[in-house]
Image (cartoon, coloured by chain):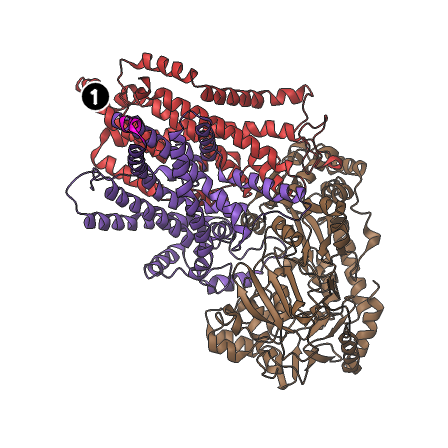
Amino acid sequence: MAVAKGAPKRGALLSIKIPRGRGASLGFYIARRILWLIPVLLFVITITFFLAHLAPGSPWDKAGGRQLSAPVVANLNSKYGLDQPLAVQYIKYLLNVTHMDFGLSYQYQNHTVMSIILESWPITAINGALAFLLIVPFGIGIGIVAALRQNTWVDFLAVGFSTFGASVPNLIIGILLIIVFSVGAYRVTGGNVFLPTGGFGLDDHLILPVITLAILPIAFIARLTRSSTLEVLRQDYVRTAWAKGLKERLVVMKHVLKNSLIPVVSALGPTFAYLVTGSVIVESVFAIPGVGRTVVVAVQSRDYPLILASTILFALVIAIANLIVDLLYVVIDPRVRLS
Amino acid sequence: MAAPAVALEQIDWENPEQVGLWKDAWQRFRRNPIAVLGLIIIALLVLMALIAPLLVGLHVIKDPLEQDVVNSYASFSLKDPLGTDYLGRDLLSRVMYGARISLSLGILVQLVYLVIGGAFGLVAGYFGGQIDNLLMRFVDVWYAFPDLLFLLVVVSVLPPSLLTLFLALGIVGWVDLARLIRGQTLSIKEKEYVEGARAAGSSPLKIILKHLLPNTLGPIIVSLTFGIPRVIFLEAVLSYLGVGIRPPTPSWGVMLQDGYQAIFSYPHQVFIPAVAIAITMLSFSFIGDGLRDALDPRMRR
Amino acid sequence: MDGSTGKLKWSRLATVMAGVALVAAACGTATTNNGNTNMASSDKQIYRVNSGTEPNSLDPGQQSYDYEGIIGRNVFESLLRPKQDLSDVQPAAASSYDVSSDGLTYTFHIRQNAKWSDGVALKAQDFVYGWQRILDPRLAAGYVDPFFDGTVAGGQDYSKIDPKNDAASTAFVQQLGLSAPDDHTFVVKLQQPAGYFKWIATLWVGAPIRKDIVDKYGSDKWATVPSQVIGNGMFKISEQVPKDHITLVPNTNYWGDQPHLQKVIVYFIEDANQAFSKYQTGELDAQSVPLANADLVQNDPKLSKELHKNPSLNTFWLTPNLHKAPFDNLKFREAVSHAIDRQSLATNVAKNQYAPVTTFIPKGMNGYQPGLADVQKYDPAAAKAALQASGVSAAVANGVHYLARNTTTNKQLAEYITGQIKTNLGLNWTIDVIDSKTVTSRIRKAQFDIYGPDGWGADYPDPQDWYDINTTNACHGLNWGCPNDPNYDKLVQEADQSTKDSDRIAKYNQAGTLMTNQFWVTFLYQRTSWVLIKPYVQGIKNTPMDDSLYVPGDFFLNTVYIANH
């Protein structure tokens, strides 16, 4: 539970909705869930559209110094259609979105929003994918080891780590990592060896951001795995088998592993969502030009089309992650039925 | 925060047992050293926040706004135990005053959650049917909204003030509570004593206030406890991005932003607020975990 | 520098023998480091710098930010360029220029041997097109006002043309005073005499543009693909990695000597700490010093030797709202100005990256008025006396909201200033540090008490670039306080239209005295650029106009080279 506090999406890590009921086919269920996306996206677009346009200031305002003159601003408004009534702009936008046209960015003149998203998306995806590669083995591993060595110092350490990781937000973890591995290492080695404080590159630039991004889900999955493993271990037949000998222990281990999968799967969807939404903070701390950072800059520069497109993207990712986890749940746990 | 809620939904909140339950819960909470540690730390933080102005008055610590630019970025010393910031302001005093903002914002915003989430959850759960459907669909849609983005935009739109921040944080975080309370209400409203009250002709409002609300308290308290550090964190993020607390008021988020600029030259500038936030959030987690275990009847065996 | 007499001579000579003078100047700059034995091999001639932000556009017509200048200035070449000491202009794409005796017609002689990076010959018509395009309302170029619409004949109607009306827009650009009587002569007719016009011809946005390319790919699309950005500058773009860097390589078709540098890699690193650490690890060859790291750099035995401090031509100030109490009161403005210790701000808060300033034109520029320094100086006693004399009630004086943009440095300045006001005047002001766009929308609507810091950096080293800011008709462009003083307007107009430099400077000086005495703004500081440059980067020619602080020597990259190391 505590995990969710670090996640930018409210409770994202735990938004596990298990569909219940009987009689509906999988296809029908998926179709309904996808149809449901339409009102969700419409709502997200509407709120974001009007909020963004109502925000004081125009995309053409500069961050200081001499501002563009009134005629230039008028010409820019005309060029980008901002001189039309808001309702007209809104309808036009909706129509454009239906055929995947997200318009031109204001900030990067003449570049399409789609091209900007496509430029920044791989960066977020690479960081997210690497984090994910850490999350599953470390999360499950720490959880199982802690459960098997319950009440030993190993368990204590694991629980301590997962409580810390689940409670302390990525913003703070990122800063603390920079202090130790960038600034600290810089001082100790006289500036010879230290990790970069930010930026993107397929090298040591990845280390700190990926760890920062991964800690929360690792901690969360470790907690889930530990408690589910403990539950399995407590059952009588498992205790008996465990007592019998090495061979049986192996059988038990298989059983335990299989059972620990269920909570992990349930956490996958929220984890995916977090890897995207969490990028807003991690990319801000480490100045990484991914979608998260792009969004923050877009809000600051009133790049309405870019704000809207990123919001839609984020909402989609969250919704799809939830859908996938619900479906996986059905596959893994036959007791769950679709409504 | 739905997962523990699922667990808590299974708690059988029987009315007659209530007094005993709270007593039991406290007993169990007391036996949990980690939870007690968390409680002690938070109590100390609250105390620190409360007496900070008094200490300034008694000249034990400096005024958090008092500038001494000649002495900027000072290191630890007797005069300034935690050093000073870029304007030579005492960091110890600023951390203590920062606790006032963070804690009060964290706790007050929970009230907003309680009001909005409570209203949605109780009404949806009690009336059920179409009303429930409509409200819960709205909650679902709200849930799909990327909240940090929403916050960023809202905080930019509204005039900057503590009130704005308070309201903005309030309107993004109530959804979990609404779901939780709805679930609780659904499971309790079929209970005999509620049915009895309804048969006796009590008004819906009265039933909600008198029977349903008190019986959903346990999980709500747990949820709110976990909600506090989340708000503290969001304040820090917004201030870190430059749209949070208005200067010169010291807040941990603002100190984080200021300190980060100087991370290479003076790492203690950012380390101090970072540790303050980490400790506070950990402590609330300890308390939340403790409360959840204590309030979970399954733990009684 | 005392440039006024030099300028006088120059403008007299200009009409007669400008061509000769300019060619001579060109020879002067061309003899650099050739045959330098210390120069590293050509594969090592790579200069890695950081412009801080990715250019919003690669189309010079649509650029307007200082961080875009490094690309715009080096991929395209304007008619003229400033001399390193900023005393005058020197030839660039134009080998010389003549001014008619009435000062209304400028004739630029385009180099016969100038070529575009694809080998096509550069023609005067390319300048006609480039300048017409900037002035085309449909392009909505950011830099058009006031540099181009305020000078080029016919440009004054810019604001009256509806950009949706193609015919009207086309007719408008056709009637402008821009023409090419032959392939190598570009003629600009002005609205009125403008002694400063040669400097407009140095602006990088006034670049020539290839009509065939714009027509082929579209006016908004051509510059979105680096390979389509055909320029006439010394460098061309070889690659752009979005969000990361742009690489410039020599344009082998450039008319002049080839640069020593074989690559200039311009990174877009926003985070100052990150850029600083990249300099440390040797991934950047030059980088400005973040304020918070000033002490670290100065105390570091190695870094302190690589530190270069250069004055830069800018002034920063606080803008009071002159039409709203209490800042409509001259005495109150005086009190505030006297209450701020700028020296302490510069030394203690800004660690000497600022120099205290109490006048408009920055030190190092033509028109600097050191004699006025005492008018707004720090003087707590005078501040208290002025507050008394102002008669402003305590409630009003305490009710002031100080508006600032939400960057860290602006916020820190706000805290310092309000601290000074509290200490020296006993007033408690409220700080509104808010989202930058919201600030702009407020100051545009005059919804503020006092706002800052705001400032100006020279586009070119002529006071005209500065004094125009405060005229009544420029209200709400940068002079948010909106002073309207016919005397000031008249002085500035007369100076702008004069072709005699001594006369111009004298009138600008009168205007400067007027605005300083009226406390239209409260002057605060001038920035000093602190740049770390690796010792092996040689031949850097700094100018005080290298405003972005990020790319040392970006006006004269032709002389920069990498030494053996």
From the viewer's perspective, is residue A143 above or below residue B16?
A: below
The residue that disc 1 covers is: B191
Residue B140 screen position, x and y as percent: 31, 41
Chain C painted colour: brown
Residue C81 screen position, x and y as percent: 71, 71
Q: Amino acid at mark 1?
A: Lys
Magenta part of the chain: A239-245
- Please say whether residue B215 is one of the residues in the magenta stretch: no
- Quarter of the image with the N terminus of chain C is bottom right
Residue at image point 55% right, 63% down: A71
Most common SS among magenta residues = helix
Q: Quadrant of residue C250?
A: bottom right
Chain B painted colour: red
Count of numbered marks: 1
Q: Residue furthest left?
A: A23
Nearer the observer, C64 or A263: A263
In the picture, measured across the screen, residue A44 lies left or right of residue C77, that is: left
Residue B122 visible in the snapshot: no
Residue at image point 57% right, 80% down: C118
Residue C248 screen position, x and y as percent: 60, 69
- What chain is colored purple? A
Residue at image point 33% right, 46% down: A321
Residue C213 visible in the snapshot: yes
- Quarter of the image with the C terminus of chain C is bottom right
Nearer the observer, C540 or A191: A191
Nearer the observer, B168 or C507: B168
Nearer the observer, C113 or C277: C277
Query: Badge 1: few (under 14), some or many (20 or more) residues near its Cα, within 10 Å?
Result: few
